[in-house]
Amino acid sequence: MTVTLDEVVKSYPGTPVLDGVSLTVHPGEFVSIIGPSGCGKSTIFNLLAGLDSPDSGTVDAPRCGYMPQKDLLFPWRSILDNTSLGLEVQGAGKKEAREQARELFGVFGLAGFENARPRELSGGMRQRAALLRTVVQGRDVLLLDEPFGALDSLTRTSMQDWLQGVWQQYRWTVLMITHDIREAIYLSDRVIVLSQRPSRVVTELSIELPRPRGVDVITTEDFARYERRLLAVLHA
Ligand SMILES: Nc1ncnc2c1ncn2[C@@H]1O[C@H](COP(=O)(O)OP(=O)(O)OP(=O)(O)O)[C@@H](O)[C@H]1O
């Protein structure tokens, strides 16, 4: 099912945020949103997740799994119980929820950590656990709000590489917010650039780099060309 925002306008008291934003994400696509700080990226996610409503325009989204910037893992729950929580909230039995989550532990690089507490995990592992919790809920679309924003650059690079690989395998429909142009290019089929607040879509760039992508794609001339185009738009 396709995600669509059509001419969406949204203001908070005294702050016009979205000024007619239109965008589409097709099933199985990986799309990134980049734009200046405060331009309304998280607001778009809140609208898609049904946590807020637009002043005008339409939002048409299937059921979205939302991974917020903070991992929000409960410190007192095991990783298995943290990752099965979303399914339990949706009404699944505890045993069934745990089994479904457990099946993904290998792919998410968490095998053997089922009974660990969040504090025992590295930053990258915590983010993978938060993503696992979102994915296991079986939503049609994943909304990832700066999933790697808080990680150091080496961990971040290996997480991007890992996400590229699992996405290639599962082909989830993903909409991701990032501040990192290279991350957007490396992972996405399409990059959407927003203007300063009140924001509109200024550019959409299709990333036609062959998949699966390895880290060596980052040093290619095609990659550099995409990077230059996005930098030019963002600093126009
Ligand atoms: N619930 C709210 N009530 C009032 N103002 C809000 C609310 N949510 C967001 N805003 C304001 O709306 C603007 C856009 O916020 P939003 O978090 O969507 O931007 P963003 O692009 O995600 O920012 P960043 O890149 O810094 O994470 C900001 O000025 C913010 O202060």
Image: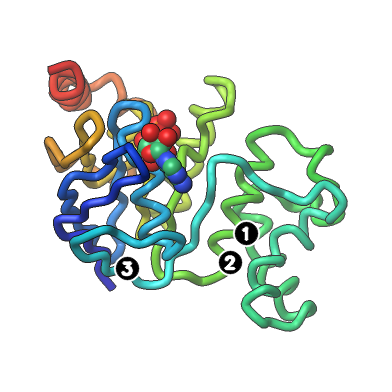
* x then y, percent, for residue 211: 28, 45
Q: Which residue is mark 1?
A: 133
Ligand 1 is found in the corner quadrant, namely top left
* x then y, percent, for residue 164: 42, 44
Which badge, 2 or 3, is on the more N-terminal residue? 3
- The answer as to whether callout 1 falls within 8 Å of ligand 1 is no
* Secondary structure of the residue carrying numbered label 2: loop
State how far apart marks 2 and 1 are (Cα): 6 Å
Q: Residue at x 21, y 38 (%)?
A: 199
Sort mark 2 into few (<14), some (14-19) or many (20+) by Cα contacts within 10 Å. Answer: many
As drawn, 67 above or below 6: above
Q: Residue at x 53, y 47 (%)?
A: 68
Which badge, 1 or 3, is on the more N-terminal residue? 3
Figure quadrant of residue 236: top left
As drawn, 43 above or below 104: above
Callouts 2 and 1 close, C-beta under 8 Å = yes
Q: Amino acid at mark 2?
A: Val
Q: Amino acid at mark 3?
A: Ala
Q: Amino acid at mark 1?
A: Arg
Whether residue 103 appears in this view of the structure is: yes
* x then y, percent, for residue 93: 74, 83
Q: Which residue is mark 3?
A: 61
Comparing marks 2 and 3, which lies closer to the viewer?
3
Return the residue nearer the eye: 144 or 108: 144
Q: Which residue is mark 2?
A: 136
State how far apart marks 2 and 3 are (Cα): 19 Å
Q: Residue at x 43, y 62 (%)?
A: 49
